[in-house]
Image (cartoon, helix red, strand yellow):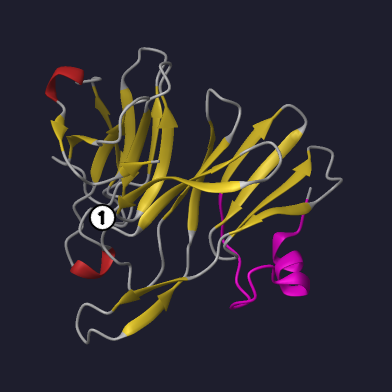
Amino acid sequence: MADLAAYELNNNPDGGDIITNPYDLLIQGNTAYVIDAGGNDLLSLNINGSNFKVDNVFPTSKTKNRTTGEEVSYQAVPTAVTPGLDGALYVSQLTGNPFPKGQAQIFRIDSDGKKEVYADGFTNIVDLAFDKSGGLFVLEYDSDGIASGDSKGALVYLPPEGNTCLTITSDNLISPTGLTIGSDNNIYISNKGFTPGEGEVIRFENPFNRYTPSILGKKY
């Protein structure tokens, strides 16, 4: 359908390193949306392979190095694209090296391609999933930042109304990589994604009565 490597080589939309890592795919109607984590962009094309184009580019940001205190740049590294109940697309970011804690954002992209920050304050997001009420589940690969040396992840819930995130669980989440909501309304997570031979899929009941308030993220 499309050669993302050739497109990155010939166009390099983010103006950075020539690198491509198609990480997520969403098909809506006759359109396929592709998140390129390496290229820092959201691409789209018709499912017949035509009209291949860049929908959005995610720029670099700045933070302070934990060790030296100097200001450094880091790439956005978008990871997941999912449709909201409002028809917009929502895109998460992992953030690149030095993988700063609390700097990962969730972007909302409307039908005209306008991008805005929907929520922020997260760390190393790898996946998103909306529930039927419009609440958003957010999966963090490493809730303390990949550079911390601690591989403990977290599953966080952002209610449809309000600006306080709710931590569902971090127990047993070690380098989690993906989530989905099953037809039984339970949450399924691929876990231990970094360790060869130890990967697993774990199931969580929707524990709405066990949410713990946190200040991980802020909804705009």
Q: Amino acid at mark 1?
A: Asp
Between 17 and 196, the residue placed more toward the observer is 17
Between 60 and 152, the residue placed more toward the observer is 60
Label count reads: 1
- Image x and y of residue 124, in percent: 34, 56
Label 1 residue SS: loop
Q: Residue furthest top?
A: 184
Between 191 and 164, the residue placed more toward the observer is 164
Looking at the rendering, which quadrant does residue 103 occupy? bottom left
Residue at 50% across, 70% down? 60
- Image x and y of residue 3, in percent: 75, 59
Q: Residues within 10 Å of mark 1 (few under 14, many from 20)?
A: many
Residue at mark 1: 142
Looking at the rendering, which quadrant does residue 191 occupy? top left
Residue at 17% across, 36% down? 169
Residue at 36% across, 47% down? 177
Residue at 25% across, 36% down? 164
Magenta residues (range): 2-23
| Position of the C terminus by quadrant | top left
